[in-house]
Amino acid sequence: MEINHEEATVTKQRMVLVYCIGIFAASWALQLIGIYSVQGNVENSAITPWLVAAMMTPALGVLLLMAFHKPAREDVLWKANWRTLAFAPYAVVIPTLVAFGEIVIFGWMGWGRSAWFQFSTGGVQVSGGRWLLGRGAQTWPTFICNIAVTATAYSLVALIFAVGEELGWRGYLQGRLIQRLGLSKGIICLGLLWSFWHLPLLLAGYNYPENRYLGALIFSPILLVAASFFMAWLTLRTRSFWPAALAHGAGDSIAGGLTASIKMTLPGLYLYLTELTLICVVGLVFYILLVRKGDSVKADSSVSFSTEGGNLLGFSESDGQ
């Protein structure tokens, strides 16, 4: 029985390696073809189909594993449950607040301002963006409702594409890495894989056009490691990848739009560092929530995860060795 268990563990580890090699090869190939097709101009919309196809490779890899290696099915957190609805507001609100934090910091420091909003004690003048409750002068309660409705709608639409990544990252790979490396190391490893999976595109100037190498090799890895603690919190609390996919959608849609509205008077490096700082703060908060004693996160009965620093969260320390 022990031998069978060890053989099963080795097989799962091999499947993780095969999975990672497969999705990296497929995604990098699609990214490189897309970059070549637009002659390196990643702002050209003609690259979009290639990026969408690359974005789907983690989910496709999981589906292939589930189809041809049935034991892998027990490792995929693909089912929704009532807790996914309970945690959905966090998935939308946190990325939206981070983006507004950037807007507030830039206005306060005099580094720039949002082209969409003029804030006052009485309300907000909304002059840009596609808001479901309209533009114009709005009281604070109306403005907050407008943000909430629009952010939720956009996040749900972007969720369709975010599933392509998150079924792989949080739905499958996160659990296997935590089981193998422990809670913190597993999440850090996942964040690094998530970042370097985007490497060809980042090196071509996507997301960090003014500092492409610094962005690809420093900013993005740190940012996505920090974000991974928030995403892990959503996933482990709900035992489902869906809230993380919703958060990913919120980051790509409403948060991305709000950040893009900032008209800067300084180089883009200031925006990159501000975003990085805020997301690192978020990552630290959710790291603390994940590892604090008495946290209500519990492992699924079929998987034992480990964590550094003792048997927190009900995980087995020995499984990560």
Image (cartoon, grey):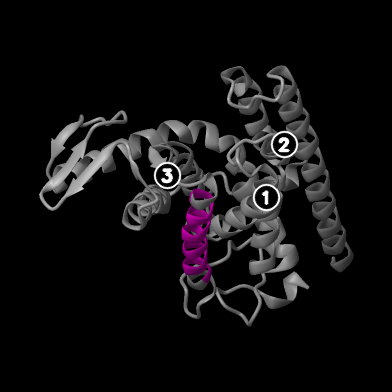
Indicate left or right for 291 with 149 as reference. right
Between tags 1 and 2, which lies in front? 1
Whether the magenta-drawn stretch holds residue 1 is answered as: no
Residue 280 is a magenta residue: yes
Q: Which of the 4 quarters of the picture holds residue 124? A: top left
Circle 2: residue type: Gly
In three-dimensional space, the C-alpha distance between marks 1 and 3, rounded to whole angstroms, equals 21 Å
Q: Nearer the viewer, residue 148 or 40?
A: 40
Give the residue pinned by disc 1: 214
Residue kind at label 3, given as amino acid type: Thr
| The one of 223 and 312 positioned closer to us in this rendering | 223
Q: Secondary structure at mark 3?
A: loop
Mark 3 residue crowding within 10 angstroms, few (<14) / some (14–19) / many (20+): few
Q: Identify residue for label 2.
A: 61
Rendered residue at 34%/39% (across/down) = 152
Using a 10 Å C-alpha cutoff, classify the residue at mark 2 as few (fewer than 14 neighbours), some (14 to 19) or many (20 or more).
many
The image quadrant of residue 174 is: bottom right
- Which region shows up in magenta? 271-287
Residue behind mark 3: 265
**Viewed as shown, does residue 4 lie left or right of 154?**
right
- State which quarter of the image contains the N terminus: bottom right
Q: Nearer the viewer, mark 3 or mark 2?
A: 3
Looking at the image, which residue is at 50% across and 44% down? 248
As displayed, is residue 28 above or below residue 77? above
Q: Assess disc 1: are there few (<14), some (14-19) or many (≥20) residues with their C-alpha within 10 Å of its C-alpha.
A: some
Q: Find the residue positioned furthest to the front.
A: 265
Image coords of residue 86 (percent x, y): 36, 53
The C terminus is located in which quarter? bottom right
Q: Are marks 3 and 2 in contact (CB under 8 Å)?
A: no
